Image (cartoon, rainbow, N blue to C red):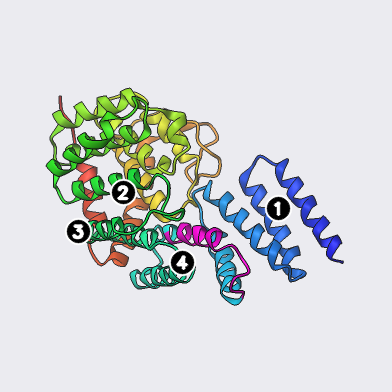
Amino acid sequence: MGINHNLEIQKLLLQRKQVDDIRAGIKILKQAIQIADAHQDIDWGFDLRLRLMNEEADLFECQESFPAFSWLLEVYDANPGYFDDEDFLWFYNMMFTSCTANASISKQQMLDIAEDYKNKLIKASFSLRSYYHLLVLFYIRTKDFEKSLEFLELGKGEVIDSLSGGSNIVWEKEIKIGNLLALDRIDEALSEIREFFFVRDKHNITAFCAYLEIAFYYSKINDHENALEHLEKGIELYDHDGLYKTNSITTTKAMYMYLLYIYGKEGYLELYEELSSWGEEIEDFSLFYFSKFAAVIFRDGGKGKLSLSPRLSVYREDDNYDFAVLHEFYKNKAFELADKFDIRNENNWQRDEFERLLVNKYVE
């Protein structure tokens, strides 16, 4: 019987390799998981759920991953020492990131999850640096930037290990700059960038992202001369394929789309078409981030042809779109999500920023 169910699972995994569509692949993995669970095979159940979570991450979605991880957590706790701690804790880290992106998960729930992760790190003899990183992200997503900087410094006192990442220093620099900009500490942010990013390779993605962050900051405070200067430097470094391979695709590219529109540069509609292909089922934070910028690029109305996915609720078979309709759709979506995040975060940060973006103009 064991051999038979193993063969069934192996056949499904072979079938998965022959399917290009990720969603279709996830359905195949769910079939394999059902077989593993029916035979109480926790080894296959564990392995297949890790695969499923990896695949869904490529869609920027988390619908199947939460129940999959709940199962993993229960089995991991019930079988101490049975599974590889590093593999499990890596996915635990990833799931916390998804929690911060979900407007339905409360601040206290996130803190409870982070504390459980910390306890598991200690038990498995890992550094607490990755735990502090979770809190850094938590405070960014809940808009307490001073707290985020505080925990960033605490993390630097811990050893870098496999769970806190080989590119740890790069990530920490990016995070520090983002926090400083959010706190209007522009001189400190520029100092950090001069020290680190702009001495790197010409086509480094990090440098592109840094220029964009600075351009966006200046744009928000209507210092358009400085915004344009940094945007143009960023345009010189833009690496479509390189950025596509990072987890910044739905955020950095959305910001880039917005800045190109504000400053009358070409390419923002092509970026909209690309980013909209992810659909409306992506994680709340990614959908909000994209929607607020999409609302802006269509605010002046007009009509045009766009190549959009049939999965979108605004899809039209003739490819002819009324930009005023798209503006209203994304504006309503962005306000809806902004309010959800603000209620969770107990502030008005997201709504206030979106309202400012809607009226931000550049006149030559």
| Badge 3 density bin: few <14, some 14–19, many ≥20, Cα 10 Å | some
The residue under label 4 is: 125
Q: Which mark is residue 28?
A: 1
- Cα distance between the residues tagged 3 and 4: 29 Å
Element at label 2: helix
Q: Predominant secondary structure in magenta?
A: helix
Give the amino acid type for the residue marked by disc 1 in the picture: Ile
Q: Are marks 2 and 1 in contact (CB under 8 Å)?
A: no
The residue under label 3 is: 146
* Residue 20 occupies quadrant: top right
Nearest the eye: 332 or 86: 86
In the rendered image, residue 219, in percent from the top left (x then y), is placed at 19, 37
| Badge 1 density bin: few <14, some 14–19, many ≥20, Cα 10 Å | some
Give the amino acid type for the residue marked by disc 2 in the picture: Glu
Give the amino acid type for the residue marked by disc 4 in the picture: Ser
Q: Is residue 227 left or right of residue 163?
A: left
Give the extent of the magenta segment. Answer: 79-96
Name the residue rendered at 39%, 71% in the picture.
Answer: 115
Give the amino acid type for the residue marked by disc 3 in the picture: Glu
* Residue 201 occupies quadrant: top left
Q: Is residue 22 visible?
A: yes
The residue under label 2 is: 172
- Cα distance between the residues tagged 1 and 3: 45 Å
Q: Name above or below for residue 5 compared with residue 280.
A: below
Q: Name above or below for residue 35 compared with residue 112.
A: above
- Cα distance between the residues tagged 2 and 1: 38 Å
- Cα distance between the residues tagged 2 and 3: 15 Å
Q: How many marks?
A: 4
Q: Is residue 336 visible?
A: no
In the rendered image, residue 57, in percent from the top left (x then y), is placed at 52, 50
- Of mark 1 and mark 3, the one earlier in the sequence is 1
